[in-house]
């Protein structure tokens, strides 16, 4: 802070003479020097360039200088000292959160900017203090602090005492700001905590505002510093050891601080409003980080023993980050946190829950580009698919926000005189959501957003293939939107812990509903466990969706619908059109044009906007696809297009001559493999379409819409689209399948059925006579 010190001394000198207006320039110079020093000293990941930081410092300093013009020389020092505290605390807070002294290494701009405003309040209060002490020695003392302590001694002033008072005031304000605005973050820098004055200040801050969570790394750093003072200084500075010990005791005894401990519940509504207001005005971006944490009971925390597992980019095969690996005990704590929060959350007015969900939609829209990029990185989704999924989720969240006002009941008559019957919808309580990897945003949010909006609390476990897109990023969005602690909990786990974590999420007594999207085999296991424990369960499972092409169909439409339905997102979609059933007269032309269409699809880097076919999400899935194709070819199927893999990529593949003994006839391949089967007529097409254990989606392409609707009545499927692809969904539509494709529905009013229960409440308005009455 050399430039700042020089500027402060210069300003003090200039202000006392006729050139006092030059203090404006001195103030600007002070701000530039302070901010440049802060930016450079804080490291290379500060979010704005040094030049922009210098400009911000100048702009912040000018109003301070303007206010100072109305005061005499000594009081200008009060203002510049306030600015110095602003800069210093910003740097302390930044270093404490970014250099790794707490468990989370990402700076959250919403919290950072809120803190800036809180610190600016300190500077404004310093102006008020200057006015109050115009004729006292405090001003001279502060000048001495900023300039020359020896001069203060000559004047008979003890600047250390004034320092203590000012430090105590600023520390109290800092602690209060931290507790009210960002109660889960620390503002102390343990590496400087053993300067006597700074220790005094940090103790006050910690007592009021806490040290953030987790406190473990902070305590460790403080302990290390204390030991260094004991052994290196050889007890020469006993006060440092005493202050350090007191600070450690404060951190251990009140890690949340007095305000954080006592006032968190009372200030929750204020915190939410502040976050909503700031979220609408301040852009915030996701970043690739080296460390992520679980989100349980409103706190970001490490997994037990710090266990992690790799998150791999399927296009490159490289691990781009590591994810915390929760265990069964973590899952139990998450469910218990959700159970504690359910009553208060469920009793909130609909407008409050709707407001939070709409705030999440605004945040989602603002971060669209980063959400798309993460989807491409983690799942191999091409840019078109990533853009579609993120955009769809925006509509999905907004639609969910309307559900609290649609969960209406009814008033029913009674045969009992004076009896009024009310049937009303109430939240089920705790909802366990287990989501898959293929459409992680959509298939997570279509359960999470409605469940929250309808007054339930949620425990979410995303797929181990997509822990960020399917879980932790969703947690960040809703945390910023203002969900209270415990309302949304997100736990990630490695493949080895999936069974035990899932078991807790299904069988825990507090869980009211389980929402699972995934394979039919896993769905059967979970349904059995839910049944034994009398749990409601919503299942969206596998599919083997047919697209029937009749002889009067528009051939171009049929080719486009089949290509999109079969190969969008490499066919890794539960409702993918994996079976083309076409009438004989059109089969040859359809096959020829479809082969030509597939030849135009570009396979490559999913980040390239021209790419149509990206990588298969996991090696396990790639092996299954390859096995299905090899099995079919070995048993006599003919490959019309594709059939080969290239690294983690698999060519769009069209097979014909597929028979029931082949695996791909009955089993879900979940990859870019489509079969084409000619049939004699529409009746045979319907019979083949229904010859499957699945029943999720189907499509009929015909030139006669009425005929298409008639055939749709005969298809055994939860969804049938006429003159469209099998791949189609809308947020308000009841999405789900029959047979082996699932139980229950998501979307629109179906979500109300899934995540609420009917309560019968009756009111007896006149004296009822019972049989025992005489």
Image: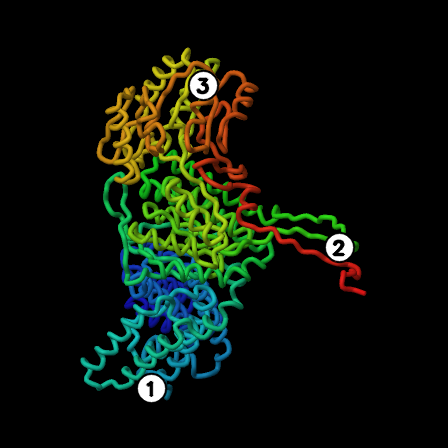
The answer to whether residue 732 is above or below residue 255 is: above
Tell me if 221 is positioned left or right of 450 in this view: left
Disc with the residue nearer the chain's start (1 vs 2)? 1
Return the x and y of residue 8 as percentages of the image width and height: 35, 70
Q: Is residue 488 visible?
A: yes
Q: Which residue is mark 3?
A: 684
Tell me if 130 is positioned left or right of 314 in this view: right
What residue sits 23% from the left and 42% below the top? 317
Q: Is residue 62 visible?
A: no
> What SS does tag 3 mark?
helix
Disc with the residue nearer the chain's start (2 vs 3)? 2
Return the x and y of residue 323 as percentages of the image width and height: 30, 53
What residue sits 40% from the left and 46% below the top? 435
> What SS does tag 2 mark?
strand
Q: Which residue is mark 1?
A: 153
The answer to whether residue 594 is above or below residue 616 is: above
Q: Nearer the viewer, residue 215 or 711?
A: 711
Q: CA distance from mark 2 to mark 3?
A: 57 Å
Q: Nearer the viewer, mark 3 or mark 1?
A: 3
Return the x and y of residue 234 as percentages of the image width and height: 19, 84
Picture disc at residue 419:
2
């Amino acid at each position: 802070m050399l430039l700042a010190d020089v500027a402060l001394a210069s300003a003090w000198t200039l202000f006392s003479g006729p050139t006092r207006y030059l203090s404006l320039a001195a103030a600007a110079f002070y701000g530039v020097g302070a901010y440049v020093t802060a930016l450079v000293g804080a490291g290379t990941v500060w979010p704005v360039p040094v030049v922009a930081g210098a400009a911000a410092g100048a702009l912040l300093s000018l109003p301070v200088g303007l206010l100072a013009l109305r005061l005499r020389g000594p009081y200008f020092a009060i203002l510049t000292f306030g600015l110095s505290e602003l800069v210093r605390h910003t740097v302390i807070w930044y270093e404490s959160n970014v250099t790794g002294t707490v468990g989370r290494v990402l700076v959250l701009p919403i919290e950072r900017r809120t803190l800036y405003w809180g610190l600016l309040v300190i500077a404004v209060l310093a102006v008020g203090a200057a006015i109050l002490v115009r004729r006292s020695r405090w001003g001279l003392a502060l000048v001495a602090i900023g300039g020359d302590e020896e001069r203060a001694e000559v004047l008979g002033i003890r600047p250390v005492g004034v320092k203590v008072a000012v430090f105590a005031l600023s520390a109290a304000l800092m602690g209060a700001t931290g507790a009210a605005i960002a109660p889960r973050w620390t503002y102390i820098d343990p590496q400087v905590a053993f300067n006597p004055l700074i220790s005094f200040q940090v103790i006050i801050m910690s007592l009021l505002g806490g040290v953030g969570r987790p406190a473990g790394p902070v305590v460790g750093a403080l302990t290390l510093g204390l030991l260094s003072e004991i052994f290196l200084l050889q007890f020469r500075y006993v006060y440092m050891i005493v202050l350090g010990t007191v600070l450690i005791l404060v951190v251990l005894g009140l890690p949340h601080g007095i305000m954080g401990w006592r006032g968190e519940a009372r200030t929750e509504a204020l915190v939410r409003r502040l976050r909503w207001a700031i979220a609408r005005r301040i852009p915030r971006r996701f970043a690739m980080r080296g460390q992520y944490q679980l989100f349980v009971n409103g706190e970001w925390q490490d997994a037990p023993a710090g266990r992690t597992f790799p998150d791999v980019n399927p296009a490159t095969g490289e691990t781009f980050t590591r994810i915390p690996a929760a265990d069964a005990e973590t899952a139990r704590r998450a469910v218990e946190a959700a159970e504690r929060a359910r009553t208060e959350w469920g009793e909130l007015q609909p407008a409050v829950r709707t407001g939070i969900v709409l705030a999440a939609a605004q945040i989602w829209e603002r971060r669209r580009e980063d959400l798309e990029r993460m989807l491409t990185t983690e799942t191999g989704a091409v840019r078109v698919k990533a853009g579609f999924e993120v955009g769809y989720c925006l509509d999905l969240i907004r639609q969910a926000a309307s559900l609290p006002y649609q969960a209406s009941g009814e008033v029913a008559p009674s045969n009992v005189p004076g009896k009024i019957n009310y049937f009303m919808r109430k939240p089920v309580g705790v909802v366990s959501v287990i989501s898959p990897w293929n459409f992680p945003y959509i298939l997570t949010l279509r359960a999470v957003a409605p469940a929250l909006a309808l007054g339930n609390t949620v425990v979410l476990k995303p797929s181990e293939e997509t822990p960020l897109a399917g879980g932790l990023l969703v947690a960040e969005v809703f945390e910023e939107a203002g969900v209270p602690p415990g309302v949304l909990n997100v736990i990630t786990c490695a493949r080895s812990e999936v069974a035990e974590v899932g078991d807790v999420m299904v069988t825990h007594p507090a869980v009211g509903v389980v929402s699972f999207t995934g394979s039919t085999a896993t769905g059967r296991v979970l349904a059995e466990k839910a049944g034994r424990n009398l749990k409601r369960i919503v299942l969206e499972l596998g599919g083997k969706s047919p697209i029937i092409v009749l002889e009067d169909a528009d051939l171009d439409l049929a080719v486009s619908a089949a290509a999109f339905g079969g190969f969008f997102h490499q066919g890794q979609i539960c409702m993918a059109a994996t079976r083309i059933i076409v009438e004989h007269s059109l089969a040859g032309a359809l096959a020829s044009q479809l082969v030509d269409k597939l030849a135009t699809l570009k396979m490559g880097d999913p980040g390239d906007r021209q790419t149509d076919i990206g990588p298969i999400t996991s090696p396990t899935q790639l092996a299954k696809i390859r096995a299905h194709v090899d099995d079919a070819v070995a048993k006599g199927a003919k490959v019309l297009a594709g059939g080969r893999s290239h690294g983690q990529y698999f060519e769009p593949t069209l097979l014909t001559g597929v028979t029931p003994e082949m695996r791909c006839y009955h089993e879900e391949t979940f990859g870019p493999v489509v079969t084409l089967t000619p049939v004699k007529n529409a009746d045979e097409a319907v019979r083949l379409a229904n010859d499957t254990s699945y029943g999720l989606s189907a499509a009929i392409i015909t030139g006669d819409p009425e005929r298409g609707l008639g055939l749709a009545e005969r298809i055994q499927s939860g969804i049938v689209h006429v003159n469209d692809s099998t791949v189609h969904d809308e947020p308000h539509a009841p999405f789900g399948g029959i047979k082996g494709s699932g139980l229950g529905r998501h979307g629109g009013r179906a979500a109300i059925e899934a995540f609420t229960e009917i309560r019968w409440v009756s009111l007896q308005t006149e004296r009822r006579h019972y049989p025992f009455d005489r």
